[in-house]
């Protein structure tokens, strides 16, 4: 299957970036207007003029940088913060100490708050807190001592930026959840469409072959039986097939544009594996599979070992009960463990038979099932009542999963 990527632009933070761009321009003009109104009160007005010239050019030239998180790079944020801090620290050079003590605003004035807000939109509340700290220190340094007005302004900027950063993180998490919900909805609609088409064609043909083969007998009966098995497997697939897990971009630098990516045929070598995808091939006319509607992730090696243990249990059913014996697989994703139960309709295992088989060198249950689960840190329990079948319960604790072959202590 070819790799496809669909980009759904549903970001709720984009209006925040547009608002930030407007805020930077307006506060830059406000700072310049404030200086023009009080230019006669500065001891070195040309220092302020030079700074405002740089601020004017920088603010307009960097507007494309504040249109999204993808364009707002770390290098830009560092330079933006440096310009804001420079303006604050140049204030005592441009204005007299007496004017500063009486409450003259810093050269960038409230433009500096836009710098901190850019950090918040880019990296969340932690980045906002990180950027607020040097701004607070610079304000106190240029005043000479912490004053009530300075502390109030610093605390206000710090709280506002951290709150906005937190809101952005929550919004991004909501977007990822929404993207997954839309992917599941789209997959469900497509599965329903395929189910209708298949029901009107393939399933009806298979059902007809099954009926005609059974009526004719002989080799045709075997063909009918196989057609019946395929009908059951195909019906199970189209009514409850696995929905591939979307990989949603969590990188803030992507501008919170959600990318739902269809999994390629070649799976990555690392990362968890959905246990359902390994157990699905076991489902057929004689084996029923019941599984959760959500993925059941396990480390890749552990998932394969658990699936192999299930296969060994089904092999025992075919060997000791018969090729036509029915079996049931139940997958349960518990908070602390994953439980897979394999049950058959056979005559059960006589008491002492497992110990006798192990003594004879037949290690199917001891090694293929119990040995695999023991290596994973889990357990395998067999419950068998004569005349009522056998149930194999495989448990793998989520917090105790270890790769097969680890030299962990076994009890």
Image: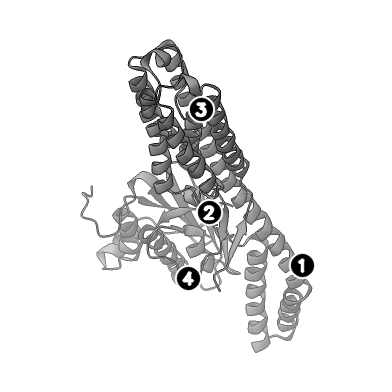
Q: Earlier in the sequence, mark 4 or mark 1?
A: 1
Picture coordinates of residue 73, whole percent (x, y): 44, 49
How far, Cα to Cα, is label 4 from label 1? 34 Å
Return the mark for residue 248. Answer: 2
Q: Closer to the camera: disc 1 or disc 3?
A: 3
Q: Residue furthest bottom?
A: 219
Q: Which numbered disc, 4 or 2, marks the residue closer to the eye? A: 2
Mark 2 or mark 3: name the one nearer the start of the chain: 3
Q: CA distance from mark 4 to mark 2?
A: 42 Å
Tell me the element at label 3: loop
Sooner in the amino-acid sequence: mark 2 or mark 1:
1
The residue that mark 1 highlights is 196
> What element does badge 4 sit on?
helix
Q: Earlier in the sequence, mark 4 or mark 2?
A: 2
Give me the C-alpha separation between circle 2 and circle 3.
Answer: 36 Å
- Mark 4 nearby-residue class (10 Å; few <14, some 14–19, many ≥20): some
* Foreground: disc 2 or disc 1: 2
Residue 133, can we see it?
Answer: no
């Amino acid at each position: 299957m070819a790799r496809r990527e669909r980009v759904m632009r549903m970001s709720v933070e984009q209006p925040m970036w547009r608002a930030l761009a407007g805020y930077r321009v307006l506060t830059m003009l406000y700072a310049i207007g404030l200086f023009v109104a009080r230019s006669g009160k500065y001891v070195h007005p040309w220092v302020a003029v030079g700074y405002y010239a740089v601020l004017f050019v920088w603010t307009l030239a960097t507007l494309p940088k504040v249109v999204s998180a993808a364009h707002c790079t770390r290098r830009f944020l560092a330079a933006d913060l440096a310009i804001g801090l420079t303006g604050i620290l140049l204030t005592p050079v441009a204005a007299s100490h007496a004017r500063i003590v009486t409450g003259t605003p810093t050269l960038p004035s409230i433009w500096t708050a836009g710098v901190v807000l850019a950090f918040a939109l880019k990296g969340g509340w932690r980045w906002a807190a990180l950027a607020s700290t040097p701004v607070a220190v610079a304000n106190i340094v240029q005043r000479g001592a912490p004053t009530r007005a300075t502390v109030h302004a610093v605390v206000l900027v710090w709280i506002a930026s951290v709150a906005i950063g937190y809101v952005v993180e929550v919004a991004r998490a909501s977007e990822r959840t929404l993207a997954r919900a839309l992917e599941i909805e789209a997959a469900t609609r497509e599965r329903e469409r395929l189910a209708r088409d298949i029901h009107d064609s393939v399933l009806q043909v298979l059902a007809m072959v099954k009926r005609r083969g059974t009526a004719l007998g002989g080799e045709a009966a075997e063909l009918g039986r196989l057609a019946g098995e395929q009908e059951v497997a195909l019906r199970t697939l189209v009514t409850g097939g696995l929905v591939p897990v979307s990989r949603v971009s969590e990188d803030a630098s992507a501008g919170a544009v959600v990318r739902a990516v269809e999994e390629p045929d070649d799976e990555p070598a690392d990362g968890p594996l959905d246990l359902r995808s390994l157990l699905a091939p076991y489902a057929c006319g004689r084996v029923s599979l019941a599984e959760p509607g959500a993925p059941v992730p396990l480390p890749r090696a552990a998932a394969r070992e658990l699936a192999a243990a299930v296969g060994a249990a089904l092999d025992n059913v075919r060997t000791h009960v018969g090729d036509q014996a029915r079996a049931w697989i139940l997958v349960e994703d518990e908070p602390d463990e994953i439980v897979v139960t394999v049950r058959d309709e056979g005559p059960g295992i006589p008491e002492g038979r497992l110990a006798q088989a192990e003594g004879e060198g037949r290690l199917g249950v001891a090694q293929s099932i119990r040995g695999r689960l023991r290596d994973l840190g889990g357990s395998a329990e067999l419950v068998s009542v004569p005349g009522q079948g056998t149930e194999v319960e495989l448990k793998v604790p989520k917090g105790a999963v270890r790769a097969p072959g680890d030299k962990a202590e076994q009890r």
